[in-house]
Image (cartoon, rainbow, N blue to C red):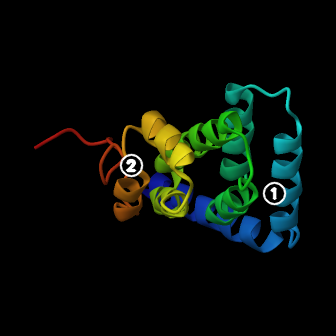
Amino acid sequence: MTRNFFLSALIAAFVAVAAVAAPSGARADTASDIAAILADTTLTVEEIAAQVAGLVTNAADPSTAASVILAAADGATDQQLEGIGIGLGNAVLALQLTDPAEAGEVALEVTAAPEAIQTAFTATTGSTAAVLAGGAGDSLLGRDGGSKSPG
């Protein structure tokens, strides 16, 4: 129990330091990164998805990164929209394991996305963005992350 307390305190301290140390230009970096991804017409759907998921999960503020990515999607090709939807879905699945509330915030951003993005997101996560956004704070595995056995 003491070990869990110290581990929780260490993680909280790390998160606090990371939040303070986050560069103020992070939003601009995400915008330039997604612009470069969308400008590269040689990328496959899978490559776009991997890069989008990385941008979101590695961002200091994943929901802001998702918002910037979605704003850049205006005028994207069908293949790019699919890649963005899959990438955002994969990011939400990853965030569910570490920060379920933030996963819900990213899903909330997707609820206003073009239909092609929402379709790819749903195919990836198994749930619509609206369902996942409505469950902000809950893990896809349950409130305890699936670590407890029933009853």
Report the front residue among 55 and 12: 55
- SS category of the residue bearing label 2: loop
Give me the C-alpha separation between circle 1 and circle 2: 25 Å
Tag 2: residue type? Thr
Please identify the quadrant where the N terminus is shown. Answer: bottom left
Q: Quadrant of the C terminus?
A: top left
Who's the residue at 48% across and 35% down the image? 124
Q: Quadrant of residue 49?
A: top right
User: Which label is found at residue 138?
Assistant: none
Q: Residue 117 or 50: which is nearer the viewer?
A: 117
The answer to whether 101 appears left or right of 150 in the picture is: right
Q: Which of the two marks, 1 or 2, is nearer to us in this view?
A: 2
Residue 35, placed above or below residue 23 = above
Q: Nearer the viewer, residue 24 or 2?
A: 24
Name the side, left or right, on which 143 lies relative to 112. left
The label on residue 30 is 1
Identify the residue at image location x=56%, y=64%: 9
User: Residue type at mark 1?
Assistant: Thr
Q: Position of residue 44 (x, y in %)?
A: 74, 25
x, y percent for residue 96: 47, 49
Q: Which residue is mark 2?
A: 128
Measured as percent of width and height from the top left, residue 67 is found at 66, 63
Residue density around tag 2, few if under 14, some if 14–19, many if 20 or more, within 10 Å: many
